[in-house]
Amino acid sequence: NAEQVVNQYGVPRFTNMHRLIDACDAIDIVTPTISHYECARAAIKKAKHIFIEKPLANTVSEAKSLVALSHEAHIKAQVGHVERFNPAFLSVKDQHFAPMFIESHRLSTFNPRGTDVSVVLDLMIHDIDIVLHLVKSNVKKVSASGVKVISNQPDIANARLEFDNGCVANLTASRISMKKMRKMRLFQRDSYVSIDFADNVTEILTLSDAKDHPDALTIDINTGDQFSKKAVRLDRPEVQPVNAIKLELEMFANAIIHDTETPVTIEDGFRALQVAHMILQKVKKNNFDF
């Protein structure tokens, strides 16, 4: 297969990782999770910029080491949390978010790829990253449960994250579902936001005094001691067609060229992995045969 590509496209072939690293300025690591640390460490040791697929590493200690090494080498490092570049999410990136309750469902049909890790590291970590990006507060408490159904790792899991600021996030991930779903709902004071990462549709419902929006749908709401007239406004932000994988790599390249911070930093990847392992610890505690 490699020889066919060399002949067809005239590109060089490398017979081992170290020769490839020597020939490049930046390395894109898309190997199985278990080898992320080895590959990233080898690249960083040679002062090469790295783009590394999620999750950042297989263990928290490996991830912590990569963070330290990247700082020592003064290289650019970006983690492939691709949902940050999803067209639906980009359509609301300028919105002010102060969510107090978040609910996400990431459901997928079974695929043997990725079963070397649990569904938490395979799928849920996408939503963990988005939630940590939106909620500007520390995680105070984690509750979780999960079940092994097909693979030797949990194939379905649910986690509840409680933050210091009072926000609660309820995350569900499954890779044994009959249908696919990648949807997140955010509830905050006077507004509701729905982001469909699969169908690229975003909806925002806002509640305000009727007099402020006379053209919007108005409803009478019982506030406890009296009825007040409120306006309900539905907005569907325009979603631009974007190739999320191409965009994240372009922004990685731009960070190198212009010496700016990567859009998804290695610290972002570390925090997401840290919370994912907190969830896995709770899953393990609730499943003695895990």
Image (cartoon, rainbow, N blue to C red):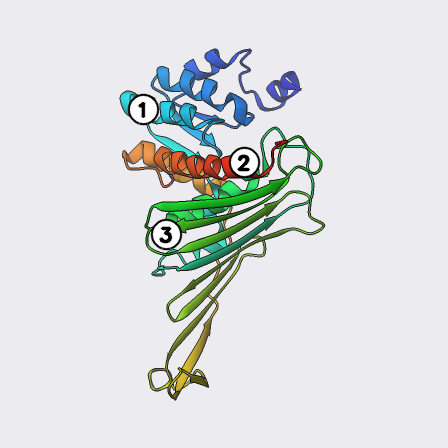
Q: Secondary structure at mark 1?
A: helix
What is the three-letter code of the residue carrying label 2? Lys
- The residue pinned by badge 1 equals 68
Looking at the image, tell me whether mark 1 or mark 3 is earlier in sequence order.
1
What is the three-letter code of the residue carrying label 1? Ala
- Measured as percent of width and height from the top left, residue 130 is found at 44, 48
- Quadrant, the C terminus: top right
**Quadrant hosting residue 289:** top right
Q: Residue at x 33, y 83 (%)?
A: 212
- The residue pinned by badge 3 equals 135
Disc 3 versus disc 2: distance between alpha carbons?
Answer: 27 Å
Marks 3,2: beta carbons within 8 A: no
Compare residues 60 and 198 and report the one nearer the observer.
60
Of the two numbered discs 3 and 2 in the rendering, the one whose residue sits closer to the viewer = 2
**Is 257 left, or right, of 23 in this rendering?**
left
Marks 2,1: beta carbons within 8 A: no
Disc 2 versus disc 1: distance between alpha carbons?
Answer: 30 Å
Dot 2 crowding, Cα within 10 Å, few <14, some 14–19, many 20+: few
- Measured as percent of width and height from the top left, residue 141 is found at 41, 46
Disc 1 versus disc 3: distance between alpha carbons?
Answer: 25 Å
Compare residues 127 and 274 and report the one nearer the observer.
274
Residue 240 showing in the rendered view: no
Dot 3 crowding, Cα within 10 Å, few <14, some 14–19, many 20+: many
Of the two numbered discs 2 and 1 in the rendering, the one whose residue sits closer to the viewer = 2
Looking at the image, tell me whether mark 2 or mark 1 is earlier in sequence order.
1
Q: Residue at x 50, y 43 (%)?
A: 126
- The residue pinned by badge 2 equals 285
Dot 1 crowding, Cα within 10 Å, few <14, some 14–19, many 20+: few
